């Protein structure tokens, strides 16, 4: 498991398995691994690590630990601090998950807390940093009360990172997992806020591509969409990468299967309608406590 593309393929399969109930994962891996015993062992080790992690449960903790065990940066915080210089002071690591490690920091000039998201080095070694930063600058122009803005993006010490405000609160993913379906009035209000934010971004031809409960924070009870434009930035930065089996032509899985429009899952070009499809899936889950489609594999979805 040496190349960035292979790591991304492993990560995709791990998260796809994690989205399924434990009793369905074996059947999913039977199909998804297609007889690749080594790949299956690696995915199963990630799943076992996730279940065993009592201190910080969730996909991020397991993914972080296994990446470290397989030779990734053992003390990324120090490297991030060196990349940030004196502009920010790292306080603690908040979580790791998806393709990023997330740190809470203080912006020294303004004395405000921010989140620093660092793209996992082993997963982004082949990216074009200038393309990534250019796309992030476009996303940073979004100014809407229900979109969490990107403050800045940068590169240093071989790392790609971006910063955003720190929000006290939880994600919609955590809220639904904790309490189940939301009351109708609350779900309707949040859906209006999210839809308004999407309409604003779409008028500026910016598509999220990975709208899901985990990418909506609740700040003072109101919806805040995070990571707007990040999927597009990764896609553009990855142009020219030769994909590994099971990975999109960019080398990145741009979206989450349970919320992904059919054309997006097929690897076809997408526009704002992919976000509207995801919005419908999200609304269904807010009202019922579960996604509209649950299958044994990403392909089946």
Image (spheres, grey):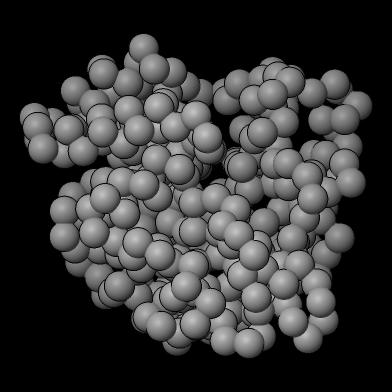
State the residue in front, 85 or 199.
85
Q: Where residue 14 sits in the image (x, y, percent)?
A: 33, 38
Q: Is residue 215 above or below residue 301?
A: below
**Is 133 above or below relative to 182?**
below
Residue 117 spot, x, y in % from top left = 56, 65
Compared across the picture, whether 148 is left or right of 145 comes to left
**Relative side of 24 to 100, left or right:** left
Measuring from the top left, give residue 189's x and y in whole percent: 88, 37
Looking at the picture, tell me which residue is in the foreground, 175 or 273. Answer: 175
* x 82%, y 30%: residue: 187
**Residue that sits furthest to the top in the current view:** 23
**Looking at the figure, which quarter contains the C terminus?**
top left
Residue 171 placement (x, y as % from top left): 70, 41
Q: Who's the residue at 36% across and 47% down the image?
A: 65
Q: Residue at x 57, y 23 (%)?
A: 292
Whether residue 156 is situated above or below residue 184 in the rendered picture: below
Which residue is painted at 85% across and 21% down in the image?
183
Asked if one can make out residue 230 in the rendered structure from this viewpoint, the answer is yes
Q: How many marks?
A: 0
Residue 140, quarter of the rendered image = bottom right
Image-quadrant location for residue 30: top left
The answer to whether one can see residue 244 in this image is no
């Amino acid at each position: 498991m040496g190349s960035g593309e292979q790591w991304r393929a492993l990560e995709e399969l791990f998260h796809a398995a994690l989205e399924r109930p434990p009793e369905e994962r074996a059947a999913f891996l039977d199909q998804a691994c297609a007889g690749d015993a080594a790949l299956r062992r690696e995915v199963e080790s990630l799943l076992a690590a996730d279940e065993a992690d009592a201190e910080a449960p969730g996909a991020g903790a397991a993914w972080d630990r296994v990446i470290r065990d397989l030779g990734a940066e053992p003390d990324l915080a120090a490297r991030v601090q060196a990349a940030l210089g004196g502009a920010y002071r790292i306080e603690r690591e908040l979580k790791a998950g998806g393709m990023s490690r997330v740190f809470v920091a203080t912006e020294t000039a303004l004395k405000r807390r921010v989140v620093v998201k660092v793209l996992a080095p082993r997963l982004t070694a082949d990216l074009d940093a200038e393309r990534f930063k250019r796309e992030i600058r476009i996303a940073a122009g979004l100014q809407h009360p229900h979109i969490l803005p990107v403050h800045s993006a940068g590169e240093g010490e071989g790392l790609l990172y971006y910063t955003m405000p720190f929000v006290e609160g939880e994600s919609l993913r955590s809220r639904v997992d904790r309490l189940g379906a939301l009351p109708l009035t609350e779900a309707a209000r949040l859906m209006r806020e999210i839809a308004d934010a999407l309409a604003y971004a779409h008028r500026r031809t910016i598509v999220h591509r990975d709208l899901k409960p985990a990418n909506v924070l609740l700040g003072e009870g109101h919806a805040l969409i995070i990571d707007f434009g990040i999927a597009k930035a990764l896609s553009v930065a990855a142009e020219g990468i030769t994909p590994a089996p099971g990975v999109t032509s960019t080398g990145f899985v741009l979206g989450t299967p349970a919320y992904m429009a059919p054309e997006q899952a097929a690897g076809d070009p997408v526009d704002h309608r992919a976000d509207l499809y995801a919005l419908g899936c999200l609304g269904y889950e807010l009202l019922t406590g579960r996604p509209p489609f649950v299958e044994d594999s990403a392909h089946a979805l």
